[in-house]
Amino acid sequence: MVAAVAQNKVIKEVPVKMIPSLEGKDLFREYCAVCHGVDGKGAGPAAGALKKPATDLTQLSHHNKGRFPILAVQSSIKLGTGSIEHGTGEMPIWGSIFSQTGQQRDLGDMRVAALVKYIEQIQAK
């Protein structure tokens, strides 16, 4: 996870701590909100340190002709974005991080699915 001091654009890397919840909203707040903001609009506390603005996740359906791009969102979460927009590298590859909990590997997929579902729920109407 990444935290930043906006005025100096200093990125402080913090080790990921797995939370016990499998609820999308909880996972989003813990792992995504630092960049994308609690509301998903891209204004999290670390957003100012990014080379490219964090995506407004509430507009994904709007930018995809009214359809939520499930596979693209799932891929971004599981595999990262493939672009260097996060100061020190790419978006964390949450799929592998979520699966490295020492528990069954299926929990990683469950976390990703819960995040995708939550992001779908926060789409602007």
Image: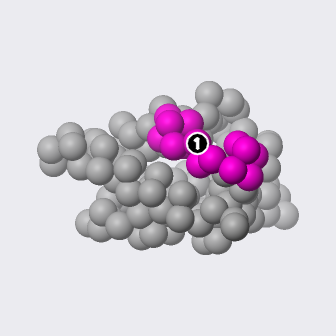
Instruction: Decide whether the magenta segment is chiefly helix, strand or loop.
Output: helix
Q: Can you name the residue that lies furthest to the right here?
A: 7
Q: Is residue 8 left or right of residue 57?
A: right
State the image coordinates of residue 26 (x, y, percent, origin top left). 42, 70
| Segment tinted magenta in the rendering | 62-75
Q: Where is the C terminus found, in terms of image quarters?
A: bottom right
State the image coordinates of residue 97 (x, y, percent, origin top left). 37, 43
- Residue occupying image coordinates x 63% and y 47%: 67
Would you say residue 94 is visible in this rendering?
Answer: yes
Q: Is residue 92 left or right of residue 23?
A: right
Residue type, label 1: Pro
Q: Can you name the residue that lies furthest to the top here?
A: 82
Q: How is the model colour-coded?
A: one colour
- Residue occupying image coordinates x 63% and y 62%: 123
Residue 88 versus residue 69: which sits nearer the camera? 69
Q: Under tag 1, what secondary structure?
A: loop
